[in-house]
Image (spheres, coloured by chain):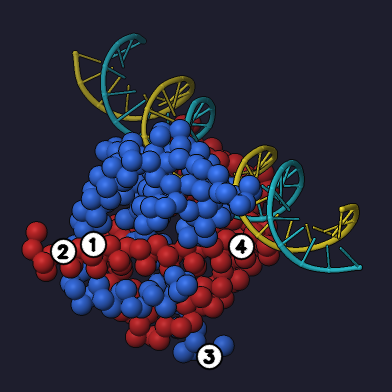
Chain colours: A red, B blue, C yellow, D cyan
Amino acid sequence: MNAANRQLSKQRLRLWLRMLSAQREVEGYLREKLRAEHDSTLPRFDVMSALDRYRDGLRMSDLSAKLKVSNGNVTGIVERLAGEGLVERAVVDGDRRAMLVRLTPEGIQRFAEMAAAHETWVDEKLSDFTAAELDTLIKLLDRLGDHHE
Amino acid sequence: MNAANRQLSKQRLRLWLRMLSAQREVEGYLREKLRAEHDSTLPRFDVMSALDRYRDGLRMSDLSAKLKVSNGNVTGIVERLAGEGLVERAVVDGDRRAMLVRLTPEGIQRFAEMAAAHETWVDEKLSDFTAAELDTLIKLLDRLGDHHE
DNA sequence: CAAATTTATTTCAAGCATAAAACATCAAGC
DNA sequence: GCTTGATGTTTTATGCTTGAAATAAATTTG
């Protein structure tokens, strides 16, 4: 490998470490806020967020696909949310294997409160960037994530 | 809140979601590779990486500070690494509370192999960016992480 | 120096995450 | 209508992660 490529490789590694650091910084803040002020967690918030966008409900497999986590993982989180009365599970008629999960009225209410707070927390953490910088970052990072469905 | 701020707030939220997505994309790949090809994990890799930079060893509390994770967390990871013979723990003379952790010769060897592979994996994932783009991303994300010691 | 506080670490309980195995149901093809 | 295979979900084993409580040793202070 030549010198230019070695340099490039180092920069890529450096970027990855910065991504990790930045992500951890924001995520830690959000986790702590959710725990302290709403007695909840980021995974629960993510599940509720997906269900809030699909008010008619989602199947377990749709949920895990959207959140890009394993099936078994979603099983546990939904179970706890159901225990708190924030989501409910219903059978899907025509397919007795499937489970339809949706927010309860209380879940909708609680999510609205959390989502509003969540937006202000993210605002605080990312307040240093100008609109142009935000656009730049979004456009560049977009090339990495695979939210291209 | 006025229209401009609402717009800005939306962009910040959008950026945060992109950061999550991008981070998850890369991390998932690295995790899978480490597991399949080196029978290891990212947390173990992180601990070994820190110890590789400090060959004289680090205390448990230094380790958790550098990695920005909890003390109890490091206890478990170091325990498993010690079980695999990759790190060793020694007493610190002058302070019987403390533990000094360092890589064993085998740990040094194993880390070198993993680190080389790790760099090529990151290379693959971030290969779409030009040198200029990498610089831009690094500089911008640098304003978020708190690796300013 | 004894008591109180701080510092270094581990233990514990709870939850999150994965991969792999187990179950149950559905859909096709003979 | 059986068998075979695919699909939807849960269970299991293992490991990571946190916050809080528990231990233990060092330091400070009256």
Going by the numbered disc 3, the residue's amino acid type is: Asn
Distance from label 2 to label 4 (Cα)?
A: 39 Å
Residue under circle 3? B2
Going by the numbered disc 4, the residue's amino acid type is: Glu
Distance from label 3 to label 4 (Cα)?
A: 29 Å
Assess whether mark 1 and mark 4 are in contact (beta carbons under 8 angstroms): no
Q: Quadrant of the C terminus of chain A?
A: bottom left
Q: Quadrant of the N terminus of chain A?
A: bottom left
Residue under circle 4? A32
Marks 1 and 3, the one that precedes in the sequence: 3
Distance from label 4 to label 1 (Cα)?
A: 30 Å
Residue under circle 2? A6
Residue B142, position in %: x, y? 39, 75
User: Could you tell me which secondary element the residue under label 1 belongs to?
Assistant: loop
Q: Residue at x 32, y 38 (%)?
A: B106
Marks 2 and 4, the one that precedes in the sequence: 2
Of circles 1 and 3, which is in front? 1
- The circle on residue B138 is none
Q: Residue at x 57, y 61 (%)?
A: A31
Q: Is residue B43 left or right of residue B25?
A: right
Of circles 2 and 1, which is in front? 2
Instruction: Count residues near mark 3 (Cα–Cα under 10 Å), then give few for <14, some for 14-19, many for 20+.
Output: few
Disc 3 is attached to a residue of which chain?
B
Labels 2 and 3 within one chain: no
Labels 3 and 4 within one chain: no
Residue under circle 1? B126
Instruction: Count residues near mark 2 (Cα–Cα under 10 Å), then give few for <14, some for 14-19, many for 20+.
Output: few
Disc 1 is attached to a residue of which chain?
B
Labels 4 and 1 within one chain: no
Residue C1, position in %: x, y? 87, 53
